[in-house]
Image: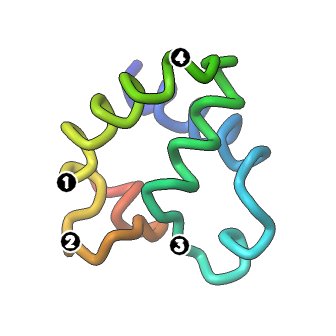
């Protein structure tokens, strides 16, 4: 179930990622914040809480601590 949720969220989020993100295969923190905000209709007041929440889990996805998530990192079990 989590994998299906992850894939569904990834698909929805990629719709809102800037085109240059899709070209290099990397997604940085701010791109993810913007994509989540648009995907889940988070208003300006909720952006700060969203950033805090994403910072807490960012290391789970950005395993090499590069500041960006590549496809390999995102799909890692």
Q: Residue furthest front?
A: 45
Q: Residue 3, image x and y in percent?
A: 42, 32
How many C-alpha atoms fall within 10 Å of the one at disc 3: few (<14), some, or many (≥20)? Answer: some
Q: Residue 40, image x and y in percent?
A: 64, 20
Dots 1 and 4: beta carbons under 8 Å? no
First in residue order: circle 4 vs circle 3: 3
Image position of 43 (left or right of 64): right
How many C-alpha atoms fall within 10 Å of the one at disc 1: few (<14), some, or many (≥20)? Answer: some
Question: What kind of element bears circle 4?
Answer: helix
Which residue corresponds to the image point at 59% horizontal and 75% vertical from the top-left? Answer: 25
Q: Is residue 43 above or below residue 21?
A: above
Q: In the rendered image, which residue does mark 3 sit on? A: 26
Question: What kind of element bears circle 2?
Answer: loop
Classify residue 7 by image quadrant. top right
The one of 44 and 33 positioned closer to us in this rendering: 44
Nearer mark to the viewer, of 2 and 4: 4
Q: In the rendered image, which residue does mark 2 sit on? A: 65
Q: In the rendered image, which residue does mark 1 sit on? A: 59
């Amino acid at each position: 179930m989590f994998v299906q949720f992850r894939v569904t969220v990834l698909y929805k989020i990629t719709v809102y990622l800037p085109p240059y993100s899709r070209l290099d295969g990397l997604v940085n923190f701010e791109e993810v914040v913007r994509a989540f905000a648009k995907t889940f209709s988070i208003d300006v007041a909720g952006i700060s809480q969203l950033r805090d929440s994403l910072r807490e889990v960012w290391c789970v996805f950005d395993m090499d601590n590069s500041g960006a998530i590549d496809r390999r990192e995102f799909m890692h079990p």
